[in-house]
Amino acid sequence: MEYKTYKMNYYRTFLLLLFFVIQVAPAQTEQDRREAEIINIQRDIVAKLTGHEPIKGKKKLSSRFTNAERKATADYLVNSLKDIGLKPVKENYNVQDKKGNQYNGNNVYAEIPATNGSDEWVLICAHYDTVEKSPGAVHNATGVAIAFYVAKKIAELDVRNKNFMVVFFDHWKSNMIGTRIFTKKLQTDGYNVHSMHRSDYMGWDNDEDRAIELLASSISLESLYRIESPVPVYKREVATPESRFFSNFGYETVTLTAELKNADNSPFVRQSEDKYTTVNFKYLASTTEITYNVMKALATE
């Protein structure tokens, strides 16, 4: 009798454990799958942009500073956007500033149309150039990787109640020439811009809390990121040159970074050590998923 009772209790416990595993495992597996997918795509992008791997054939970038290396980067971004089914445009410009300095570069962008005929546009942005002799991993290959992955996933949605555009700016390091050129294009072509979202200095997380810092031009945009973020969100108090520039044109903006105010950001920014090997890809994936969830919320609202 005691043996039968023990056996029944054993089976009952086994079934309860099995039920618990079945209930819990799928959620964990799905989360792990999403993270692995993001990391796999972003490792490839950051590796190629930083010269960790060849960007084409045997060619490796040392930085994205010279005309030749920035052109190779623009070509790579165009081909990468084509690979995910988008129709990218490489917009060349050749301008001269008031001091007589000549700038020749390429902005790369691709439109992702709304499915309901909306005229509103949400822009997902990042600059792709670097300072001289810097591979520019955290500054700003990771921002490019975020924008690319989010654009890929937004393009896969069955419903988009807004238009989206992914934009990679050239010449950020030269008084934001590429950004200025593209912003003028938006105005000239009459785009009704809902908001512009950009990432920079992302990919370093020394305390491993996955926290982000955010500067938003409106409470509604800030709230949206806080709602979609399972990690701490710190409010940036100082406006970036880009946010001030976009605001001057009347655009709502969001800038995402690592914890600059808490000094949890890469010590290698703008240096030769800003390499692929310094990037925390789990942290990058976490921030990317937050950004995608915000874009998805804007797409379906």
Image: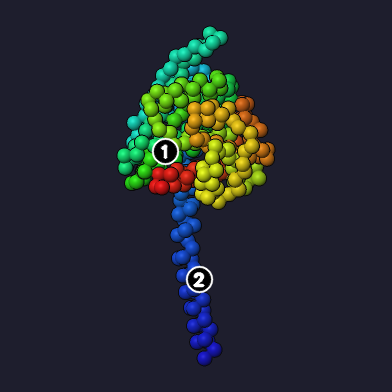
Residue plotted at (60% across, 48% down): 232
Which residue appears at 53% of the width and 30% of the height? Answer: 247
**135 up-or-down from 289: above or below:** above
State how far apart marks 1 and 2 are (Cα): 41 Å
Q: Can residue 181 be seen from the camera position used here?
A: yes
**Around disc 1, counting alpha carbons within 10 Å, would you say few (fewer than 14), some (14 to 19), or many (20 or more)?**
many
Residue 36 appears at what percent x and percent y? 48, 47
Name the kind of residue labelled 1 in the image.
Ala
Q: Earlier in the sequence, mark 1 or mark 2?
A: 2
For the point 36% across and 43% down, which residue is it? 160
x and y percent of residue 138 in the render?
57, 33
Percent position of residue 163, x then y:
37, 37
Question: Is disc 1 placed on a helix, strand or loop?
Answer: helix
Identify the amino acid type marked 2. Answer: Leu
Q: Residue furthest top?
A: 100
Does dot 2 land on a helix, a strand or a loop? helix
Report the number of discs: 2
Q: Which residue is mark 2?
A: 17
Query: Is 49 displayed left or right of 110 in the figure?
Result: right
For this orientation, the residue located farthest to the right is 263
117, above or below 54, in the image: below
In percent of the image, x 45 and y 65: which residue is there?
A: 22
Q: Nearer the viewer, residue 23 or 156?
A: 156
Dots 1, 2 in contact, CB < 8 A: no
Q: Which residue is mark 1?
A: 151
Residue 52 visible in the current orientation:
no
Position of residue 46 measured from the top left corner of the image (x, y, whole percent): 50, 34
